[in-house]
Every structure is written in structure tokens, then in C-alpha cells.
Amino acid sequence: MDRRILLRNLLLGIPTSYLFPSMFSSCTKTDLLEGSDFKGSVIIVGAGAAGIYAAQLLKNRGIDVTVLEASTRIGGRILADDSFAGIPLELGAEEIHGKNSLFYDLVNFCFPDRLLPEQGEDAYWFENQLRSETFILENSDLQGAGQTLFQINDSFGSYPGSDMTVLQYLTEFPVEDRFMEIANALIANEYGTSLNRMGMFALREAEAQYSSGLDGFFLREGSVWDIFEKAFPEAIDAVLLNQVVNKIDATGLKVAVTTSGNQTYSADRVLITVPITILQEGFITMLPALPADKLAAIQSINMGNGMKIMLRFSSPIWTEETGSIVGGVVIPEYWVTTKGKGTTAHVLTAFVMGEKAEALNGLSEQQIREAILTELQLMHPDEDVVGKCIGILVKNWADEPFIKGAYSFPNPESTGQREILARPEQGKIFFAGEATNFNGHLATVHGAMESGFRACKEILES
Amino acid sequence: MKKLRTIVFLSIFFSGNLISQNYFDVSGGMQTLQQTEWNKTIQTYNFNRIWLKEQMPDLRNASNVSIGYSGVLASGLFFSPSLSFSSFKSSATNGEYRSMVRLRWLSVPLCLDIFPLEFGKDSVSSSIRPFLRVGGGASLLMPRVLVNDELVTVGEEPYQPMVWPFFYTAGLGIRYNLNRSIGFMFSAMYLKYPNINLEDFSYALNGNNLVGLKNESSAQTMTFQLSCSFRLNGPKTDAEEGGKKKVKFKKRR
């Protein structure tokens, strides 16, 4: 090649290199936390799923983290009982909702053999008889009303109408009254409340974004807390128990956190993960006061009462196929907790939320037992339900002094408020917890974990 | 649709004009990818799954194979359609837990090769022939997210989207004719995808989109290829005929 040709080639090459500069910049790493250089200290208030997960995320980034927990134990609404039936029974969070979630991934990684798909079939308490799903769907006398009932859940995410309570909507929609207890169980009780307390817009907001999938899983052995204990040991080490925080002062350079024992901790950032009820009741004084829209958001998101009642039987009163009983008047949902878990114990979990939980709230354990066994006897007339019941364990989450309820739900006033609740304040105060989850996964363990991640990212970018 | 019609029209137009100083190219090489949103999605996965010791790397490089055809349109100007395939992978194996993002990338570029040293001339000056390549086309992208070799689901459906983004491309190459039948070609191509609408990738990998990653984003790739070129039967070039063609002057008589 002579010099002239070489020169021409070079002249072609130079402008070409100008065409591609952005391509060569691809060699630099894109970073999720672009511009983040936070290296300070963080106090996390609350050692539930969100707090523990956020603590572990921050510790992994080398951040100095202290977790202050008001109660005498770690876990918040994750709690198991080992003594009642010889296997861990979840008194709080139990089901793993969907396969496409952080929590499912965690369990699938730590204990893949323990994932137990929902067992058995649903039986529906319908017109004073237990009926199968097939009966509800295919019985010609019902003229498709059963199908309407089961399909309606899929339509909430694209609800086009005006705002009203879910009960009002179902009444207007062709869901017959005789199906209303089943609808209450499937829609409202699952969300931790009652149909008349849920709003259509708030429900649409949650359902439209829910992306975890509909498969349900339980743990074949062990407890939900075992998973956290195995996965997040450093976060657990950072927890200080019996630290009831009653003041957070962000007026200084550092944030001062004071407990009821007059102990003061200070850090560069504070992450609040307490249940919404604790914020609502003003247990924690904030300095400076939170903005008006934040205070309004706190008051607008409701959390209902919730109970889990374990009933142990000497032998099953249910059929071999039964997994759940849906649509009870006293208890909207029962499920056979011990099914598929390789135990000889026979335990039925009674899951009651919202108004129905409030109805049981003032009753003694004996009265609760009688109310439930009366209903179960009606459902199983050929069984000696009372005679076979050998134990009862009641967990009323409203009685927990630092929780005061089950989980947040989509009440009408909560529409659009979770994002405001989640918003950081003054660049120093951050919020996490299931109630702050504004991407459709409220009221779930993975939703709490997601909020912990969001807050952690906000802190690192602050 | 307008772009697609234009491409189809060009293909038909050029195919009718192809004369037979043609090449068939079989190529291998690598493709690099720059796509910030997808890599942020993977980084979000890594950030959250702190229990995984081995993390998933960004989608960066993939080996690439292609077949192509170059047909002469005029002296120093070729039409070069091709079909290329790359498979980008980002995977991590932690014990028996294997997570993977696989992005299969099939492209159909329709390009013009301009040989500046020969453009407008009737002769080929050298067996080493640099060229400039410009064009555009469409790609078929098939991203998949697998956990333990099982496709993940979004909602209730397995996540297996197929998207067809358009791109434009420019690059440089060089052809070297080893003999009358076989030659080699090296090319470096830049491809710009102004808009790729890949829905729900963050939901598929992370189960959420808390980071607010966009479905629609641009991407750019760079492809480096070494080709083996097979000369198809056709009229010989002047160089092959043994010398320059004599220039004929109109005689003034």
C-alpha cells in the first residue's frame, strides 16, 4: 500500500472513531448506585422483616448499623410456636406468595426442599354445606354465579369505575348475597380486613402492580424465622432488644434517637420500620415535625385486627382431600396446617381478620374455642368436633403492644398514600415496612423486604 | 411499519440489480453490548440477593456468528444483507442454585459497502480493500430469565418475550482476496437501537420494579467479525483480467 493510500485510510479512520465514542464508553461499569458515597452510620427502628433485611443490605455495604427493637424478640410479625403441636406453627407470616419474589428466592436458595405447595383442595361453606370448587363452578342451579365469583378477583387490577367500597361494588356487580361470605374470605380476609373496609381504587392500585404470581407455598419443616436467621446473621447481631424509641430528633447534624429508658443513640441516618399503627398512635415524637402530607398519609393507611387460632385435634375432622375451608361466618378461612408436613399432629389454623376478628377480640379463649367449634360442628355434622379438639392456641396480633394489628390493607383513603409514607424526610429519616410498599406487595414478607431494599438504596444515595 | 416497507422495497430493488461479482461470507466474532437499564436490572438482582456469593455479571459480550452476501451494485458499491446471531449470557451458580439471564439476539442488517479506493472506478487497485459499511435493519431479541434452568413467570405466564427493534449501523471493514475464490474480511460495526421496548424485564428478574427501570430504552452494540469470503461465479474484475481496461476516446474524425 503506498503512502497516499495509507493517508487516505487514516483520514477515513479518524472520523469513524468519532462515530463510536459512546460504544467505547461501554467499558465503564454502569452502576445501580451511581454517585453514592454514603459511609455514615444508620439506626434502624424495628427488627421485623423490613428492618432486618435493610440492616443486612447496609452491613453488606460496610455501613455501621444498629437496630433498635422495642419488644423482647426479633422478627416482628414473623413468629412461630414450637410447643403446641411438636412442629413450628406460624403465628404470623406463613404463606410464601408467588414464585417471583425476593422471599421465594431466599427460601428456594436456603431450603429448596422445604417449599411445600399449597396442599389439598378448597372446600366452600355454601348454603350450610361444604361444597367443592367443582360444585360451585359447574352446578347448573347456580347459573354461572360461581364462575363470576372466582373470576372477579382477576378484574380488580383494571377496574374502570368510580371509587366505592369493595362491598358496594360486589353488591352492584352480579355477586349474589349467598356468595358474599366466600367473597369476603377470598378477597378481604386475605387482605387482612373486611369487604366494607376496602376501597376499589386502593385495591386496583395494589392488584394492578402485584407481580409475584398466584402460587402459594408453605414450609414443609422449620419456620419462616429460620430462613431469616440463616440468611441475615449480621443484621441479627446488630439488634438491641427492649429499646422502645419515643423520640427521633433530626434537627442536628446527626439524628438523635431516644428510648423510653432515656438512652440516646445517634447516627447519620435513621430508618423507621415500625408498623403503621405505631406511627398513627404517635408513640414516636419527631423533631422537626413530619410534613402535613406525611402525617395525613400515616393516618390514611389502615391496619386491621387479625388473629390466628390453632386448633389441635386427636384425629382429622376434615376429609383427606381438604386443604382449606373457605367462607365461614365466624372464621372466614381455615386451613390444615399440618397437611404435607410429615407429622402425626392434626392442626387446623383459623385465620380471621377485620370485623370478624374484632368480634372475637373481647372474648376469652374458652369463648373463642366454643364459637369456632360450633361453626366447625355445623360444617362437619358427622364428626365429634368438640370431643376431638384437644387444644387451642390463640394469637391476637392486636394485643401485641408494639404491633397492634395484623397488616395494612387497601382502605379507600389509602389510595396513593403509600408512596408519600415511604418518602424520605430531610434527607435523614427513611421509612420501610410492608405498609410503605407501593408496588402492590403490601401485607407480605417479600413486600416488607422490598421496602427495606428501597429504603437502603435511598440511604446509600442520600 | 414505514421503515419496514422501506427495507423490503430496498431489498427487492437491489436484488433485481445484483450482478454477479458477489461474495458469500461466513463470519465469526464477538458482539459487545451497552444497555444501561438491563444491566441495572441485573445489578438490582445482585444487590438484593445478598445470600448469593457468586453474582451475575452485566450483559457485555457474546460470541457472534453470521452469514452474509455481498453483491455488487456499481463499481466500489455493494449491497450486503446478512443474518447474524449472538447469545448474551449472565449467570451465577451458587451451589445447586443457578440463575441466568439469556438474551438471544438475531439481527438482519441490510447494508451498503462503499469501497472508497474503487468507488466510481473500473479497476480494483489492490487485493487489500478497505470499505465503509452503512445500513440498517431489525433484530429479534429473545430475553429469558431462568432459575435452576426453569423459566421464571411474570404473573402467571412464563416470561418469554420477543421484541423486534430497528437499528441503524455504520462501520469499517477490510477485504483481502487470497485468490480468485477465497478471501477474508474483517469488519467492525456499530449498531444503534434507538428504542427497544422490553416489557417487564425487571419484574421477571427481580419480582418488582422498585428501581423504576424503564421498559423503553436505547441500546448500542459493536460487532467485530472475521469472515471467510467465498467468491461466487461471475465476471472477472479488471484486475483479474490481467490489467487495466483501455480507455476509449471518442475519435474526432
Image (cartoon, helix red, strand yellow):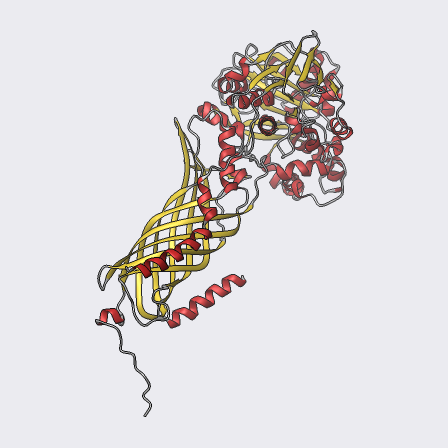
The answer to whether residue A384 is visible is no
Q: Name the residue rendered at 34%, 64% in the picture.
A: B117
Question: Which residue ends up furthest to the top in the rendered image?
Answer: A261
Q: Please count the marks in the image.
A: 0
Which quadrant would residue B156 be assigned to in this image?
top right
Pick the quarter of the image with the C terminus of chain A. top right
Residue A203 placement (x, y as % from top left): 69, 36
- The answer to whether B103 appears left or right of A335 in the picture is left
- A194 left or right, relative to A339: right
Residue A147 seen in the figure: yes
| Lateral position of residue A1 relative to residue A264, left or right | left
Residue B113, x across and y down, in percent? 38, 62
Q: State left or right for residue B108 relative to residue A223.
A: left
Q: Quadrant of the N terminus of chain A?
A: bottom left
Q: Nearer the viewer, residue A398 or A56?
A: A56
In the picture as drawn, the residue positioned furthest to the bottom comes out as B253
In the rendering, at what x and y percent does residue A51 appear?
A: 60, 21
Task: Where is residue A331? Give x, y as percent.
Answer: 68, 23
Q: Please tell me which residue is depicted at 54% across the width and 47% down the height of the picture.
A: B217
User: Taking A365 as reference, is B62 above or below it?
Assistant: below
Query: Residue A362 sits in which quadrant?
Result: top right
**B164 versus A324 height, above or below:** below
Q: Residue at x 51, y 29 (%)?
A: B47
**Residue nearer the viewer, B59 or A264:** A264
